[in-house]
Image (cartoon, rainbow, N blue to C red):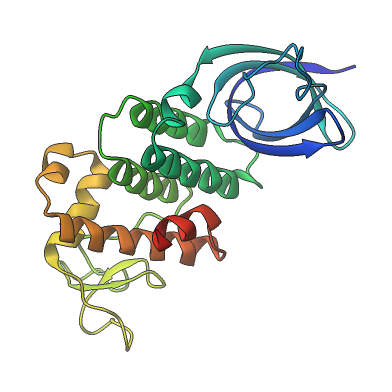
Amino acid sequence: MKYYRDEAIVLGGHKLGEADRIVVLLTRDHGLVRAVAKGIRRTKSKFGSRLEPFMFIDLQAHVGRSLDVVTQVELKEPFARGIMSDYDVYSAATVMAETAQKLTEDEPRTRGHFLLLLSAIRSLCNREHPPRQSMDAYLLRAMSLAGWAPSLVDCAQCGMPGPHRGFSAAMGGTVCTDCRPDGTALTSTGAVQHLAALLSGDWARVASTADHTAFESSRLVTTYVHWHLERRVRSLNVLERT
């Protein structure tokens, strides 16, 4: 029987049978893993709450035919305890986890995404920045890591030096007047600068952005993510409606 050990972040899961649960894990070196945690829903489960969403764990599992089987779990950092106590923080973490899962489903190497998500979840848990800003920064960086970095200064199509007010998710970011598709909404310069600050981690500039500009930027991030993933992030849709 082939065993492996790895660090992982629990992204989610669902019930299986009367006492088991399928958990979705983003691991450091084994990609996105779906594994069965047997007996986890029983009162005397040996796993306890260590496989709740957002937990950072040290995992041992053995490879199964369709699903791996969790055999041992050691808790490294209990992020869920800090995240579940605040609705806004929980909502942002849920978006991060769902996006990470969608971006890594077909990726054999996920170390970069694992480290990025771990850093983002830890920052969110510690309340280092407002939840929505932490989420937007993570989304921009995750999309960039996946190969979809937005152009936020020069035109995404022709390379004309910016800044430009047109922003097209389909074109890859800001676009000049000549390249701007019909119907492209114009954005404020401040909104694009806010996106650039989130992407680069310039938190001093992020903190000085007016609320309405930050909201405009956040809507651009949502549009950009949905376009390039070619499917909706359900938790992000729920967040937008609220």
Residue 117 rendering spot, x and y as whole percentages: 46, 34
* Residue 41 as seen in the image, left or right of residue 128: right
- Tell how many labels: 0
Looking at the image, is 123 positioned above or below residue 134? above
Q: Does residue 220 appear to the left or right of 15 in the view shown?
A: left
Residue at 63% across, 43% down = 107
Quadrant of residue 8 within the rendered picture: top right
Question: In the displayed structure, does residue 133 sit left or right of residue 91?
Answer: left
Q: Nearer the viewer, residue 137 or 171?
A: 137
Residue most toward the bottom?
A: 182
Residue at position x 16%, y 67% in the image: 161
- Which residue occupies the extreme front position in the image? 43
- Residue 59 percent location from the top left of the image: 67, 17
Name the residue nearer the viewer: 225 or 156. 225
User: Which quarter of the rendered picture does the N terminus lie within?
Assistant: top right
Q: Tell me what residue is drawn at x 55 percent, y 66 percent.
A: 230
Task: Classify residue 217 by image quadrant.
Answer: bottom left
Q: Nearer the viewer, residue 44 or 109?
A: 44
Q: Residue at x 27, y 79 (%)?
A: 185
Question: Does residue 5 appear left or right of residue 176 in this picture?
Answer: right
